[in-house]
Amino acid sequence: NKHAVNLQPTTLHLPNLLRADYYCHHCHCFHKSTTTNTNKQNNKMKFFFLIATLSSTATAFTTGFAPSVVTKSSTSTTYNYDFALNAEAAAATTNGTDKKKVIILGGDGFCGWPTSLYLSDQGHDVVIVDNLSRRNIDTELGCDSLTPIQSPQVRVQAWKEVSGKDIKFVNLDVAKEYDLLVQLIKDEQPDSIVHFAEQRAAPYSMKNSKCKRYTVDNNVSGSNNLCCAVIDSEVDAHIVHLGTMGVYGYGTSGGEIPEGYIDVILPGGRESNILHPAYPGSVYHATKCLDALLWQFYQKNDSLRITDLHQGIVWGTNTPQTIRDERLVNRFDYDGDYGTVLNRFLMQGAMGVPLTVYGTGGQTRAFIHVTDTARCIEIAINNPPNAGERVEIFNQVAETRRVRDVAELVAKQTGVEANFLPNPRQEAAENELDVSNRKFCSLGLDPITLDEELFNEVTEIVNKYKHRCDPTKILPASFWNKKRAEECATLDPTSVKIKA
């Protein structure tokens, strides 16, 4: 009654379960319930809209829903709509779903590669730009991806064979080869440019002075070059940047973390809505905060259209596109520098290695599956801000979990105990984290949450390639400061043993 909507669930077909989702305009989010196959015939969604709102919402509903019956009530000026929800179309909005030319900077990486395939699979014209720096860091660290990733040339050829679609690959350094970047944008005339081309690991950014300086030089220069190149090319390209939840800090907002902007009361009682204060926890996170300031400046000064996505910790490996051919497999990092926490736990559990929990494990973090990363990117490019509008910011997360609780889930599934290690990071031992993700939910995202069946998929990958694992790379090898290094001095990388 509070929502003034008469709702019955519409089914989305998922394995072993029917998910019933509906969008509520009262709280601006999708609500979820479950139903069994026996209720399949009764699964419908009924919305009642006043005529006054019909014209403004008609486009959105023809895009996101397939109307089956439209009738007029005999007792009021209200229309009764029966809809069959289309899961893919629900992600589209009134901003349009035209297929776009998309340049993906950093398209060879952990998030960039599956996103490139997903966008191509959706019909977009994709150009990957990458200088292969992440592969060079593999060589520097002496630690390869657990999965045997192929060269970019082999990857795009394999995609052509399985999909019939072309992806162009361009080897270019965004932070150093400015003139080539400008010319590429002029030649390709992209609708959107997705920016993944940054050094993405907080531990690596804290490893030593060389890594700190490289992270700043590469990330900040690359972002500044991108803005300048869009201006100099005179191409009205929408920039979509993959940021991080770490720009907010953890537990510093005193409540729910909003999406980018926060309401404040200035001296004199003046109300304002400003960019959320930055509170980075590493050099990597600091570069993302500097990026945010660059986006704000270039939007204000040059009316660039920019979307900044503050993403949680990514887990998972394969997507519906990467599993179509072994040559398309995504990279899987398990080491202490680049392995994300859940992927590290799943790898360790599958190999019988005690789970490496840092400190008390009381850190609460936001998580998102790599498949949802790709879906969110498409939602963002389909919903660009208009020229002159401030930077659009989304919190790109599915859920928040405490690290020790995640370890407990994996330990329960694998039978491997958790090993609480001295924390190599300078961070609070415990924190709360409440994050708003209403924008993506309102645009049709039904996020994947931590699930044991999906854990199994990652475990299968680990078991298949565990012969490629170097156990000496599992323990942390980067420390935030001298005190942390001293506390972790007893950690012995050679002590880690993998069960046969």
Image: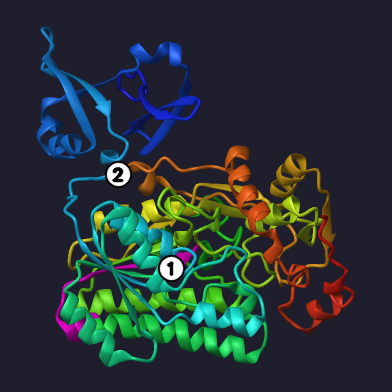
- Amino acid of disc 1: Pro
The residue under label 1 is 267
Asked if 28 appears above or below 293 in the picture, the reply is: above
Mark 2 burial class by Cα count in 10 Å: few <14, some 14-19, many 20+: many
Is disc 1 surrounded by few (<14), some (14 to 19) or many (20+) residues within 10 Å?
few
At 25% across and 45% down in the image, what residue appears?
Answer: 92
Closer-to-camera residue (34/443): 34
Left/right of residue 435 with respect to residue 7 in the rendered view: right
309 and 159: which one is in front? Answer: 159
- 187 sits left or right of 223 in the view: left
Residue 405 forms part of the magenta stretch: no
Q: Which of 233/134 is in front? A: 134
Question: Residue at coordinates 42% horizontally, 66% vertically from top-left?
Answer: 112
Q: How many labels does the image show?
A: 2
User: Which quadrant would residue 290 be assigned to in this image?
Assistant: bottom left
Q: Is residue 231 magenta?
A: yes
Query: Which residue lies under the disc numbered 2?
Result: 91
Q: Residue furthest front?
A: 161
> Is the Cβ of the residue at disc 2 closer than 8 Å to that at disc 1?
no
Considering only vertical position in the picture, is 64 above or below 356?
A: above
Please report whichever mark, 2 or 1, sits nearer to the chain's N-terminal start: 2
- What amino acid does circle 2 point to? Ala
Residue 458 % position (x, y): 60, 50
Q: Which is in the foreground here, disc 2 or disc 1?
A: 2
**Residue at image point 84% right, 57% down:** 419
Q: Which residue sits furthest top?
A: 74
Looking at the image, which is closer to me, 278 or 271? 278
Q: What stretch is highlighted in magenta?
A: 230-244
Measuring from the top left, give residue 33's x and y in whole percent. Answer: 46, 25
Q: In which quarter of the image is residue 230?
A: bottom left
